[in-house]
Image (cartoon, rainbow, N blue to C red):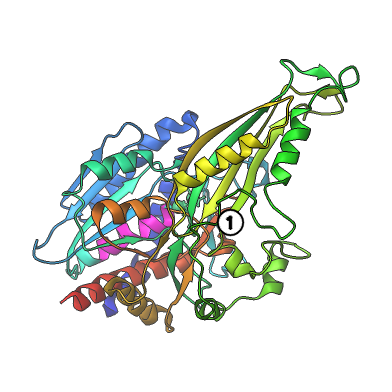
Amino acid sequence: MENIKAYVQEHKDRFINELIELLKIPSVSADTAYSHDVFETADAVKASLEKAGCDFVEICDTPGYPIVYGEKIIDPALPTVLVYGHYDVQPPDPIELWTSPPFEPVIKKTEIHPEGAIFARGSCDDKGQMYMHVKALEYMVQSNTLPCNVKFMIEGEEEIGSKSLSWFVERNQEKLKNDVILISDTGMISNQQPSITTGLRGLSYVEVEVTGPNRDLHSGLYGGAVANPINVLSKMIASLHDENNHITIPGFYDNVAELSLEERAEMAKAPFNLENYKKALDLNDVYGEKGYVTNERNSIRPTLDVNGIWGGYTGEGAKTVIASKAFAKISMRLVPNQDWEEITELFTKHFTSLAPAGVTVKVKPHHGGQGYVTPIDSIGYKAANMAYTETFGVPAIPVRSGGSIPIVALFEKELKSKTILMGFGLDSDAIHSPNEHFGIFNYLKGIETIPLFYKYFVELSK
Ligand code: BES
Ligand code: MN
Ligand code: MN
């Protein structure tokens, strides 16, 4: 494998340019205005897998956006790695906050990325990280070092809940048979300290609607005499947390898997600097559930957050009005053993019960998924750690992430295999935010590290 470093050095400009081409296609799955681009991106991914050396690649149609499936089977008796990634991206807005257009990738240097980073929507989440696997395959095929079988499954609906992928996985268990699932769609601690994500939070996402009068009213003529849906919604939302920032929904914590003090002490060993954390976000303090520190609040604890809230008049100047309706989008991040459908029900029941006379409330569930934890004594984890240790010079630290990839729990249920989350992004890469970027260092290190995972996974599987 000494050659992988040399191969990356020799081909890095091409690797970067290929990724840039992929990033130019605005594959925003949430907005149907981009539908054509999402399909076009699937075609581009297919072509890249063919070029990299897959023996068979197909676009699998689904009720939604297609899944790109590719494989190279060298010997059915050998282990099979299933690579998952997504080619869809988040909407780019607020577009005015980007320092360069989201779908015109440029390389810029930053404090954290002195070698430069590619700025574009999807550069880190997940086109850049997904494409590392395509280039790692290219290397292994070119150098004749692919030690096992490989399957790729790249979807286009991850950012909107992976509905079609669930549909696809349920119908293709045999085709997707594998010994380990490998995903790069998470992050690591820093470019000096790699980490392996051992947990993901689950998710329940709902939208609520509070209706008062049947039309918008003059806030002088009617103010004080009828329920104002925005006032009421604000009160209802405020009551969802108590003074300790615990969530007040009855039963919400019933199944939460609590960590032992030993496990929490182990977690606290991961490098973390609260002052830098605050500084990076321009915060005068952190905020959260009493009794837990920042790294626990955003990983092993469930949360409830309003993601958007609207109603009434928000245009220029003042308009005196009591709106007929108020809305909010609310997400709950869940931890192992919390069932997302059960939590959605508990939320609905509780939230509806909060409504005072004078309004009606509707709760519309969007999507969700279960959390995930993976053991650190599996062959896959060990192989990943050996790979990172070799390319970074230090072992990786296991870290539970606060983000969600709901499909991972479904993989375990349907395909009965464990997932290894080898992420190369950084929290500061601004995924889902304006100015998303992915370090050139991270991109190339990923390409370098992945073939070593294959090597060690096959060795340890013997
Ligand atoms: N890649 C992210 C999830 C992620 C990022 C996990 C960083 C851990 C570290 C993924 O694309 C994502 O954004 N997931 C959504 C959930 C989905 C159902 C919309 C999320 O976490 O909000
Ligand atoms: Mn992602
Ligand atoms: Mn995402």
Residue at (27, 45) in percent of width and height: 169
Where is residue 315, by image quadrant?
top right
Query: Residue 103: in sight, yes or no?
Result: no
Q: Is residue 51 above or below residue 25?
A: below
Q: Which residue is at the far right?
A: 220
Q: Residues within 10 Å of mark 1 (few under 14, many from 20)?
A: some
Q: How many marks?
A: 1
Find disc 1 in the rendering and name its residue. 430
Q: Secondary structure at mark 1?
A: loop
**Residue 350: x and y, percent?**
60, 41
Magenta-drawn segment: 127-139
Q: Amino acid at mark 1?
A: Ala
Q: Is residue 65 a member of the stretch shown in magenta? A: no
Our reading of the magenta stretch's main secondary structure is helix
Residues 237 and 309: in front is 237
Residue at (71, 67) in percent of width and height: 278
Q: Is residue 33 above or below residue 388?
A: above
Left or right relative to 109: residue 281: right
Query: Residue 165: in sight, yes or no?
Result: yes
Q: Is residue 314 above or below residue 382?
A: above
**Residue 415: x and y, percent?**
24, 54
**Residue 60: x and y, percent?**
25, 38
Q: Which residue is at the far bottom?
A: 393
Where is residue 222, by image quadrant?
top right
Q: Is residue 128 a member of the stretch shown in magenta? A: yes
